[in-house]
Amino acid sequence: MLGLLLLLQVLASCLCPGHSEVVKSFQGPCTRFFYEKTPPSDGIRPVNAARICQVYKNQYRFATLYDRTNRIPVYSAYIYQPGPGDRHDTWYIEPQLIQQDYHKYMETEDSIIHTYGITPADIGKNQAILQDYIDAQGLDRGHLSPCGHQINEEYKNSTFTLTNIVPQYSKLNQGAWKHYEDTTMHQNTQGCDTTYVITGVVPGEDKVPSQRVNIPSHIWSAACCVKGKKPIKAWGAIAENKRNMNVVTNLKLGKLEEMLTKLYKGTVVTLFKNDCPRQMEKAQEIF
Ligand SMILES: *[C@@H]1O[C@H](CO)[C@@H](O)[C@H](O)[C@H]1NC(C)=O
Protein backbone atom coordinates (compact mmCIF):
# COMPACT_ATOMS: atom_id res chain seq x y z
CA MET A 1 0.00 0.00 0.00
CA LEU A 2 2.76 2.41 1.00
CA GLY A 3 4.68 1.42 -2.12
CA LEU A 4 1.69 2.20 -4.30
CA LEU A 5 1.27 5.62 -2.66
CA LEU A 6 4.91 6.39 -3.28
CA LEU A 7 4.59 5.33 -6.89
CA LEU A 8 1.55 7.56 -7.33
CA GLN A 9 3.44 10.45 -5.78
CA VAL A 10 6.34 9.99 -8.15
CA LEU A 11 3.97 9.84 -11.12
CA ALA A 12 2.15 12.97 -9.97
CA SER A 13 5.38 14.91 -9.64
CA CYS A 14 6.26 14.08 -13.24
CA LEU A 15 2.97 15.58 -14.37
CA CYS A 16 3.50 18.86 -12.51
CA PRO A 17 2.38 21.90 -14.48
CA GLY A 18 5.80 23.55 -14.16
CA HIS A 19 6.66 21.77 -17.39
CA SER A 20 4.43 23.89 -19.53
CA GLU A 21 4.54 27.58 -19.93
CA VAL A 22 0.89 28.46 -19.43
CA VAL A 23 0.33 26.93 -16.02
CA LYS A 24 -2.51 26.37 -13.56
CA SER A 25 -0.62 27.95 -10.69
CA PHE A 26 2.78 29.57 -10.31
CA GLN A 27 4.82 26.59 -9.19
CA GLY A 28 8.27 25.11 -9.46
CA PRO A 29 10.86 27.23 -11.25
CA CYS A 30 8.43 30.11 -11.68
CA THR A 31 8.00 30.79 -7.97
CA ARG A 32 11.48 32.24 -7.65
CA PHE A 33 10.27 35.53 -9.13
CA PHE A 34 8.01 36.13 -6.13
CA TYR A 35 9.18 37.16 -2.67
CA GLU A 36 8.90 34.04 -0.45
CA LYS A 37 7.48 32.23 -3.51
CA THR A 38 4.16 33.99 -2.86
CA PRO A 39 2.24 35.55 -5.78
CA PRO A 40 -0.15 38.48 -5.18
CA SER A 41 -3.62 37.80 -3.76
CA ASP A 42 -6.48 36.89 -6.07
CA GLY A 43 -8.11 40.34 -5.86
CA ILE A 44 -6.46 41.39 -9.11
CA ARG A 45 -7.03 38.19 -11.08
CA PRO A 46 -9.43 38.60 -14.01
CA VAL A 47 -11.92 35.88 -14.96
CA ASN A 48 -10.16 34.78 -18.11
CA ALA A 49 -6.61 34.72 -16.71
CA ALA A 50 -3.59 32.71 -17.82
CA ARG A 51 -0.46 32.31 -15.74
CA ILE A 52 2.62 32.40 -17.93
CA CYS A 53 6.07 31.25 -16.89
CA GLN A 54 8.02 33.18 -19.50
CA VAL A 55 10.53 30.90 -21.22
CA TYR A 56 13.24 32.17 -23.56
CA LYS A 57 16.11 29.97 -24.79
CA ASN A 58 15.05 27.14 -22.50
CA GLN A 59 15.18 29.21 -19.29
CA TYR A 60 12.53 30.79 -17.08
CA ARG A 61 12.92 34.58 -17.18
CA PHE A 62 9.95 36.09 -15.31
CA ALA A 63 6.29 35.40 -14.56
CA THR A 64 3.16 37.04 -16.01
CA LEU A 65 -0.52 36.95 -15.16
CA TYR A 66 -2.28 37.52 -18.48
CA ASP A 67 -5.84 38.67 -19.17
CA ARG A 68 -6.99 36.89 -22.34
CA THR A 69 -10.16 38.98 -22.66
CA ASN A 70 -8.45 42.38 -22.51
CA ARG A 71 -5.37 40.96 -24.25
CA ILE A 72 -2.98 42.64 -21.81
CA PRO A 73 -0.92 41.38 -18.89
CA VAL A 74 -2.30 42.13 -15.42
CA TYR A 75 1.20 42.02 -13.97
CA SER A 76 4.70 40.72 -14.54
CA ALA A 77 6.87 39.63 -11.60
CA TYR A 78 10.65 39.67 -11.85
CA ILE A 79 13.89 40.23 -9.95
CA TYR A 80 15.57 43.62 -10.47
CA GLN A 81 19.08 43.00 -11.85
CA PRO A 82 20.09 45.70 -14.31
CA GLY A 83 23.02 44.63 -16.48
CA PRO A 84 24.72 45.19 -19.83
CA GLY A 85 23.51 44.05 -23.25
CA ASP A 86 21.97 45.49 -26.38
CA ARG A 87 18.29 46.04 -26.90
CA HIS A 88 16.80 44.13 -29.87
CA ASP A 89 13.22 44.83 -30.78
CA THR A 90 12.30 41.33 -31.94
CA TRP A 91 8.74 40.74 -30.77
CA TYR A 92 7.36 37.44 -29.51
CA ILE A 93 3.97 35.97 -28.69
CA GLU A 94 2.91 33.09 -26.43
CA PRO A 95 2.20 29.88 -28.39
CA GLN A 96 0.33 28.23 -25.51
CA LEU A 97 -2.30 30.97 -25.53
CA ILE A 98 -3.22 29.70 -29.01
CA GLN A 99 -3.29 26.08 -28.02
CA GLN A 100 -2.15 24.52 -24.75
CA ASP A 101 -0.05 21.80 -26.44
CA TYR A 102 2.02 24.23 -28.52
CA HIS A 103 5.67 25.11 -27.62
CA LYS A 104 6.28 26.33 -24.13
CA TYR A 105 8.69 29.09 -25.20
CA MET A 106 7.97 32.48 -26.70
CA GLU A 107 8.17 32.69 -30.47
CA THR A 108 7.87 35.33 -33.21
CA GLU A 109 4.59 35.52 -35.11
CA ASP A 110 6.27 34.52 -38.37
CA SER A 111 7.91 31.52 -36.81
CA ILE A 112 4.73 30.22 -35.20
CA ILE A 113 2.76 30.71 -38.43
CA HIS A 114 5.41 28.65 -40.18
CA THR A 115 5.67 25.96 -37.49
CA TYR A 116 1.96 25.25 -37.07
CA GLY A 117 0.54 26.45 -40.39
CA ILE A 118 -1.85 28.90 -38.72
CA THR A 119 -2.96 32.47 -39.50
CA PRO A 120 -2.37 35.78 -37.67
CA ALA A 121 -6.08 35.66 -36.71
CA ASP A 122 -5.50 32.31 -34.97
CA ILE A 123 -2.59 33.81 -33.03
CA GLY A 124 -4.58 36.86 -32.00
CA LYS A 125 -7.58 35.03 -30.63
CA ASN A 126 -6.49 35.23 -26.97
CA GLN A 127 -3.60 37.71 -27.14
CA ALA A 128 -2.40 40.92 -28.74
CA ILE A 129 -0.40 40.77 -31.97
CA LEU A 130 2.01 43.33 -33.44
CA GLN A 131 -0.60 44.81 -35.78
CA ASP A 132 -2.70 45.89 -32.77
CA TYR A 133 0.19 48.10 -31.67
CA ILE A 134 1.35 49.30 -35.07
CA ASP A 135 -2.05 50.94 -35.62
CA ALA A 136 -2.12 52.59 -32.17
CA GLN A 137 -1.02 56.24 -32.50
CA GLY A 138 0.50 57.98 -29.48
CA LEU A 139 0.75 54.68 -27.65
CA ASP A 140 3.99 52.85 -27.00
CA ARG A 141 4.50 49.18 -26.36
CA GLY A 142 5.05 49.66 -22.62
CA HIS A 143 7.01 46.93 -20.85
CA LEU A 144 5.87 45.67 -17.45
CA SER A 145 9.09 43.73 -16.86
CA PRO A 146 11.39 46.29 -18.49
CA CYS A 147 14.37 45.45 -20.65
CA GLY A 148 16.54 47.86 -18.62
CA HIS A 149 16.07 45.89 -15.38
CA GLN A 150 17.42 42.63 -16.79
CA ILE A 151 20.87 41.20 -16.22
CA ASN A 152 21.98 40.32 -19.77
CA GLU A 153 20.97 40.27 -23.40
CA GLU A 154 19.06 36.97 -23.22
CA TYR A 155 16.96 38.24 -20.33
CA LYS A 156 16.48 41.58 -22.12
CA ASN A 157 15.30 39.78 -25.26
CA SER A 158 12.75 37.85 -23.22
CA THR A 159 10.94 41.03 -22.18
CA PHE A 160 9.89 41.64 -25.78
CA THR A 161 6.99 39.24 -25.65
CA LEU A 162 3.70 41.05 -26.24
CA THR A 163 2.31 39.18 -23.21
CA ASN A 164 4.55 41.53 -21.15
CA ILE A 165 3.35 44.67 -22.98
CA VAL A 166 0.51 47.16 -22.51
CA PRO A 167 -0.57 50.18 -24.59
CA GLN A 168 1.13 52.99 -22.65
CA TYR A 169 0.90 56.64 -23.69
CA SER A 170 4.26 57.68 -25.14
CA LYS A 171 4.67 60.79 -23.02
CA LEU A 172 4.41 58.78 -19.81
CA ASN A 173 6.43 55.81 -21.06
CA GLN A 174 9.28 58.05 -22.20
CA GLY A 175 8.91 60.60 -19.39
CA ALA A 176 7.98 60.10 -15.74
CA TRP A 177 7.67 56.32 -15.99
CA LYS A 178 11.11 56.05 -17.55
CA HIS A 179 12.44 58.28 -14.77
CA TYR A 180 10.90 55.95 -12.21
CA GLU A 181 12.37 52.86 -13.91
CA ASP A 182 15.84 54.31 -14.42
CA THR A 183 16.43 56.74 -11.55
CA THR A 184 13.99 56.07 -8.70
CA MET A 185 14.52 52.30 -8.87
CA HIS A 186 18.28 52.76 -8.94
CA GLN A 187 18.16 54.98 -5.84
CA ASN A 188 15.64 52.91 -3.90
CA THR A 189 17.48 49.63 -4.43
CA GLN A 190 20.74 50.84 -2.88
CA GLY A 191 21.63 48.43 -0.06
CA CYS A 192 19.31 45.66 -1.29
CA ASP A 193 20.69 42.19 -2.06
CA THR A 194 17.57 41.10 -3.94
CA THR A 195 14.70 43.29 -5.07
CA TYR A 196 11.46 41.58 -6.05
CA VAL A 197 9.31 43.64 -8.39
CA ILE A 198 5.71 43.33 -9.50
CA THR A 199 4.55 45.75 -12.18
CA GLY A 200 0.96 45.74 -13.36
CA VAL A 201 -1.98 47.66 -14.73
CA VAL A 202 -5.62 48.40 -14.05
CA PRO A 203 -7.74 47.77 -17.18
CA GLY A 204 -9.37 50.94 -18.54
CA GLU A 205 -12.46 51.93 -20.54
CA ASP A 206 -10.78 52.41 -23.92
CA LYS A 207 -9.26 50.15 -26.53
CA VAL A 208 -6.64 50.54 -29.25
CA PRO A 209 -8.03 51.25 -32.78
CA SER A 210 -8.25 47.54 -33.65
CA GLN A 211 -10.75 47.34 -30.74
CA ARG A 212 -8.98 44.24 -29.54
CA VAL A 213 -6.61 45.46 -26.82
CA ASN A 214 -7.55 47.32 -23.64
CA ILE A 215 -5.77 50.59 -22.80
CA PRO A 216 -5.09 50.44 -19.04
CA SER A 217 -6.26 53.35 -16.89
CA HIS A 218 -3.30 53.00 -14.51
CA ILE A 219 0.12 51.45 -14.46
CA TRP A 220 1.70 50.62 -11.11
CA SER A 221 4.79 48.99 -9.68
CA ALA A 222 5.77 47.62 -6.28
CA ALA A 223 9.08 46.40 -4.92
CA CYS A 224 10.25 44.48 -1.87
CA CYS A 225 13.94 44.87 -1.00
CA VAL A 226 15.64 42.00 0.80
CA LYS A 227 18.99 42.17 2.59
CA GLY A 228 20.34 38.80 3.68
CA LYS A 229 17.08 37.02 4.33
CA LYS A 230 15.25 40.02 5.75
CA PRO A 231 12.95 42.36 3.84
CA ILE A 232 14.23 45.80 4.87
CA LYS A 233 12.05 48.12 2.81
CA ALA A 234 9.33 48.24 0.21
CA TRP A 235 7.73 50.89 -1.96
CA GLY A 236 5.21 51.50 -4.68
CA ALA A 237 4.50 53.81 -7.60
CA ILE A 238 1.41 54.50 -9.70
CA ALA A 239 0.63 56.59 -12.77
CA GLU A 240 -2.53 57.40 -14.66
CA ASN A 241 -2.20 56.25 -18.26
CA LYS A 242 -3.80 59.17 -20.11
CA ARG A 243 -2.78 61.06 -23.21
CA ASN A 244 -0.58 64.02 -22.14
CA MET A 245 -0.42 62.93 -18.49
CA ASN A 246 3.10 62.51 -17.22
CA VAL A 247 3.02 62.00 -13.45
CA VAL A 248 4.26 59.10 -11.36
CA THR A 249 3.25 59.14 -7.71
CA ASN A 250 5.62 57.40 -5.32
CA LEU A 251 3.94 55.92 -2.29
CA LYS A 252 4.22 53.37 0.48
CA LEU A 253 3.48 49.77 -0.39
CA GLY A 254 0.53 49.77 2.03
CA LYS A 255 -0.96 52.83 0.37
CA LEU A 256 -0.57 51.34 -3.12
CA GLU A 257 -2.34 48.15 -2.02
CA GLU A 258 -5.17 50.26 -0.59
CA MET A 259 -5.54 52.14 -3.86
CA LEU A 260 -5.47 48.93 -5.91
CA THR A 261 -8.09 47.34 -3.68
CA LYS A 262 -10.41 50.21 -4.68
CA LEU A 263 -9.37 50.33 -8.33
CA TYR A 264 -9.91 46.59 -8.89
CA LYS A 265 -13.25 46.82 -7.06
CA GLY A 266 -12.58 43.41 -5.64
CA THR A 267 -11.30 41.81 -2.51
CA VAL A 268 -8.23 43.06 -0.68
CA VAL A 269 -5.10 43.29 -2.83
CA THR A 270 -1.88 42.02 -1.25
CA LEU A 271 1.15 42.24 -3.51
CA PHE A 272 3.86 40.77 -1.27
CA LYS A 273 3.92 38.54 1.76
CA ASN A 274 3.24 40.37 4.98
CA ASP A 275 6.77 40.89 6.23
CA CYS A 276 7.61 43.35 3.41
CA PRO A 277 7.23 46.68 5.25
CA ARG A 278 3.96 48.45 4.37
CA GLN A 279 4.57 51.79 6.09
CA MET A 280 8.15 52.78 5.25
CA GLU A 281 9.44 55.11 2.50
CA LYS A 282 7.84 58.49 2.43
CA ALA A 283 5.50 59.61 -0.29
CA GLN A 284 6.70 62.21 -2.76
CA GLU A 285 5.75 63.37 -6.22
CA ILE A 286 8.04 63.68 -9.18
CA PHE A 287 7.50 65.68 -12.38
C1 LIG B 1 18.62 38.71 -28.86
O1 LIG B 1 17.75 38.86 -29.96
C2 LIG B 1 18.39 39.22 -31.18
C3 LIG B 1 17.31 39.47 -32.21
O2 LIG B 1 16.51 38.35 -32.39
C4 LIG B 1 19.36 38.12 -31.58
O3 LIG B 1 20.03 38.46 -32.77
C5 LIG B 1 20.36 37.92 -30.47
O4 LIG B 1 21.20 36.83 -30.77
C6 LIG B 1 19.66 37.64 -29.15
N1 LIG B 1 20.67 37.62 -28.10
C7 LIG B 1 20.82 36.62 -27.23
C8 LIG B 1 21.95 36.73 -26.28
O5 LIG B 1 20.06 35.67 -27.17
Image: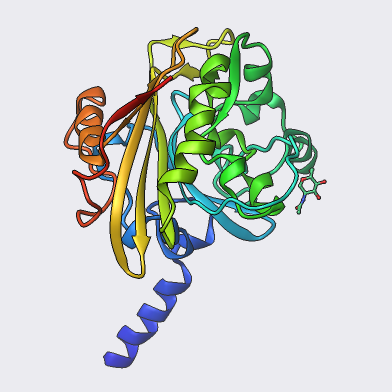
User: Which quarter of the figure has residue 132?
Assistant: top right
**Residue 88: image location, x then y, percent:** 75, 39
- For the N terminus, which image quadrant? bottom left
| Near-viewer residue (35 or 163) | 35
| Near-viewer residue (106 or 98) | 106
**Residue 283: image location, x then y, percent:** 27, 32
* x 32%, y 36%: residue: 45
* x 54%, y 54%: residue: 81
Q: Is residue 126 left or right of residue 51?
A: right
Count numbered badges in the picture: 0
**Residue 202: image location, x then y, percent:** 36, 25
User: Which quarter of the figure has residue 262?
Assistant: top left
Give the answer, above or below, for where 109 lies relative to 227. above
User: Which quarter of the figure has residue 89?
Assistant: top right
Q: Is residue 19 left or right of residue 266?
A: right
**Residue 57: image location, x then y, percent:** 69, 57
For the question of whether residue 139 can be seen, the reply is yes
What's the coloring here?
Answer: rainbow
- For the C terminus, which image quadrant? top left
| Near-viewer residue (197 or 234) | 234
| Near-viewer residue (202 or 2) | 202
* x 20%, y 54%: residue: 274
Give the answer, above or below, for where 251 lies relative to 175. below
Give the answer, above or below, for where 244 lies relative to 85. above
* x 30%, y 48%: residue: 234
Q: Is residue 94 left or right of residue 186?
A: right
For the question of whether residue 21 can be seen, the reply is no
